[in-house]
Image: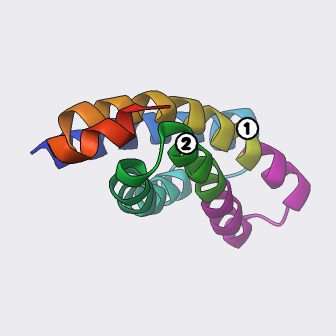
Amino acid sequence: MAHLKALAIKGIMTLAVLWLILSVGFDLLSFGTVFLITVVLGAVSYFAGDLSILPKKRNMIATASDFVLTFLIIFLMGMIWTGNVGTLATASFIAALIIAVGEYFFHYYVASNVLPKRKRVAASNN
């Protein structure tokens, strides 16, 4: 149940940011496309970043890896639906930066509510 709650929090945060940046702000992608990117990004980054990197490394390292992964997924998936590379790169960077800030705080939630106690110490340190 803790994983589902964490995935829901991450999904809502990511969907809101991506919709505001990619659909409303830059008018690049439809809501359906943004939703699909959110699902893929959430699944990949939760298991790779939050459950694999975060318990072994510090929060800042996990957040930096989330930024890179988020940028790459948004940009590469966005390339499928839009040919506007420059605008997409800018929008992807802005979205990844905002999501990374959210992930920094989300990692504290994951460390205290999702990870087993033995893995919490490393994850809660900066």
Please, what is the dominant secondary structure of the magenta stretch?
helix
Residue 38 highlighted magenta (yes or no): no
Kindly identify the residue that appears in the image at 37 percent across and 60 percent down: 52
Residue 23: assigned label:
none
Please name the amino acid that badge 1 sits on. Answer: Ile
| Neighbours of disc 2 within 10 Å: few (<14), some (14-19), many (20+) | many
Q: Quick one: label 2 or label 1, which is nearer the N terminus?
A: 2
Q: Which residue is mark 2?
A: 63
Q: Is residue 21 left or right of residue 32?
A: right
Task: Say what amino acid the circle numbered 2 marks.
Answer: Thr
Look at 35% across and 61% down and name the residue there. Answer: 47
117 lies left or right of 110 = left
Q: Tell me the magenta residue range.
A: 71-91
In this orientation, does residue 5 appear? yes
Residue holding disc 1: 94
Give the residue furthest to the bottom: 80
Q: Is residue 116 left or right of residue 38?
A: left
Quarter-of-image position of residue 5: top left
How much space separates mark 2 and mark 1, taking CA atoms?
A: 15 Å
Viewport quadrant of the N terminus: top left
The x and y percentages for residue 59 are: 48, 38
